[in-house]
Amino acid sequence: MDIKRNYKYLLSDLSSLKGIGIKTANLLKRKKINSIFDLLWKLPKSYTDRSLSSKIKDLKIDETQTITIIPLKYSFPRIRNLPNRVSCKDETGEIDCVFFNSYEGYIKKILPIGKEVTISGKIKFFRNKYQLTNPKYISEDSSLIKQKHNSYSLTEGISEKVYNKIILQIMNNLPKIDEWHSRDILKKFDYISWNNSIKELHRPENIGKFKENFYQRLAFDEIFSTFLVNSEIRKKIKKIKKTKKIFNSKKQIEIISKLDFILTNDQKKTLNEINKDLCSDKKMFRLLQGDVGSGKTIVSLISSFNTINSGFQVAVMAPTEILARQHFLLAKKIFPKEIYIELLSGKSTYKDKKNISEKLRNKKIDIIFGTHALFQKKIEFKKLGLIVIDEQHKFGVNQRKKLSDKAGKDCDVLLMTATPIPRTLTMTIYGDMDLSIIREKPNIRKPVKTYSKPESKIDDIIKFVKKEIMLGNQIFWVCPLIEESKKIDHTSAVKKFEYLKNIFPKQVYLLHGKTTVDEKEIILNKFLKNDFKILVSTTIIEVGIDFPNANVIVIENANKFGLSQLHQLRGRVGRGNKESSCILMFKSNLSDNAKKRINILKETNDGFKISEEDMKLRGFGDILGFKQSGIKSYRLADPIHNHNLFILAEKEIKRIEKENENISRFKPLIKLYDRADIINDIA
Ligand code: ADP
Ligand code: MG
């Protein structure tokens, strides 16, 4: 194996580097740096130029300078707190090197009497003499000192010197990997190779040069590798031939005509896209993306209905029981009686479950609703034709692929997400799926009025709430989410609950992280039935449950939430046809940035637009907790600044797909840049 050309060097363990012992390796591992490749992305933050040397007579006090000197005499006073001292000279003057806490043996070794030594550090003037205290940059080889030394935001316990040495070692050993990009792509970056780009990236002079070719190329590599993996998954799924679903469009018209509303154009459009997939002989792997309240459920239910009419079974998975039940009830309402609809709940008894299992295996049940429990090993379907997964943005690409594999070849997959995100992100995160987007919301929906209030004005808010209750309305009260601490969240929610209960006796219930599933369901059902007025909660019900009678949401400590999250919370109200309001509460004075964010929320109700703005203000990765979802963020690429690179990557992928190009040359790219586990069976 020609190691000089082989990318595998970069994937090797840190311990294969000279100068990294187990201790250092462990320190780095704690920072998720496991391989040499990972180290490449820890970039210098600044540098100190030690390349120019001075003479002692020209030294400037309090500045970092480099001099070449000859040690003359040691003085090692054996008195506590008195430092060791080495008098040194050059042809123009004298300087003392002063050491606190250094052994004599070490000092003698680095500063041998009579030998020329190059030394660099901040110069002081003390008792009429130049002085350098605890010098770190000392060597008889002046070239090691006379250079630019990078500073990194370092892992504690690793010195800058050691770190620079390690990076230098890696730069010297970088394999020259065969180019993977086409000439057309390379041309955009002035033909700079990956190898040279990495070297440029680590040159101290290049700190912050995001627009240069080397940086752009490396950012493109990152984006492109993600897109390529997505494309491969999509291709693979598309290759699966399935039995076409054949159904009667008259039946669809009939069921639609019975709805108490008219489908929006986007609902019709997305329904057509899904129907087309169902009827094709290629397996569907489609994402239905639409803002909260855009009406995705009905689209998925009509698709399910069509699937059932073509003789298949359907499974609908929701993230929570309540939501599963709500979908189940809706299906019962709109589907004709001959369709057998079932709900698998966590509360179902063992006997019930066994019974349901049996009926699924015999194809007695046409459609089943439930949580992820539906996908347990024990549950088998006789003829599963469609899986619908609601609110699934917590699924990573890996899980999706597994799901699709498990579903079997005749089973189409429809994922739904209520998190509108910027296009660049959609391409990154959902690039393995076909996409249907609902932008237009049902026009019965009145926009939610959004207000911001400081906490000190809580009396005004209470007055407002009282008025709404008089009108027969219900209120969500979302409690502050403080520093990810469940315990603190809990106490503050309880406190607010007590406070509100005093003002509104018997009208307030509390939901928090410790509420059991059963309790939660009882409370939510009571709320649905309008048995009480105010539901205090932490953010645990941040999903698409429909409470048509709730038209006010109060969100405390609103600056703790991202814009998109606030928008999602706001989406819990305004689902009926009443005027509704969202009150954002703040602790004290708002920063300019926070004010900007609030204004965006006030100005628009378009989730796609809000997410774009959110990304601009907070940066990629923070938005909507994608970090926690296991979807990695890029190291260099940035969907805002590198928008053009995303578009370029998309274009190149399309070209490769169209020309059916062999992608084996991208193997190193894919192996290096993450997600190698997905691609194992591909490249
Ligand atoms: P989401 O996309 O957030 O899942 P839902 O499917 O829960 O939204 O729909 C929210 C509400 O809007 C439901 O009460 C539903 O009955 C209603 N709805 C859906 N489509 C329409 C429409 N075309 N016109 C009026 N109301 C609609
Ligand atoms: Mg929904």
Image (cartoon, rainbow, N blue to C red):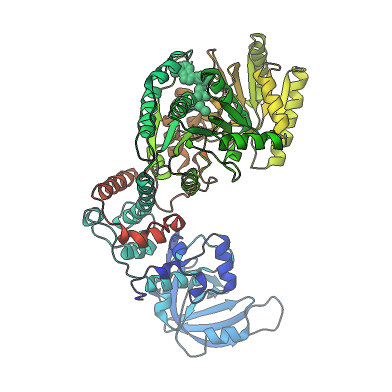
Q: Residue at x 26, y 55 (%)?
A: 189
Q: Nearer the viewer, residue 284 or 162?
A: 284
Q: Residue furthest front?
A: 362
Q: Is residue 560 left or right of residue 249?
A: right
Q: Is residue 45 left or right of residue 344?
A: left
Q: Residue furthest top?
A: 471
Q: Is residue 630 above or below residue 410?
A: below
Quadrant of the rendered image containing residue 350? top right
Q: Nearer the viewer, residue 403 or 613?
A: 403
Quadrant of the rendered image containing residue 167? bottom left
Q: Position of residue 677 (x, y in %)?
A: 46, 57
Q: Residue at x 30, y 57 (%)?
A: 663
Q: Position of residue 660 (x, y in %)?
A: 26, 51
Q: Is residue 128 above or below residue 511?
A: below
Decide if residue 234 is in sight here: yes
Q: Quadrant of the C terminus?
A: bottom left
Q: Nearer the viewer, residue 279 or 517?
A: 279
Q: Position of residue 642 (x, y in %)?
A: 35, 46
Q: Residue at x 43, y 63 (%)?
A: 40
Decide if residue 493 is in sight here: no
Q: How many marks?
A: 0
Q: Position of residue 420 (x, y in %)?
A: 45, 33
Q: Is residue 189 above or below residue 407?
A: below
Q: Quadrant of the N terminus?
A: bottom left
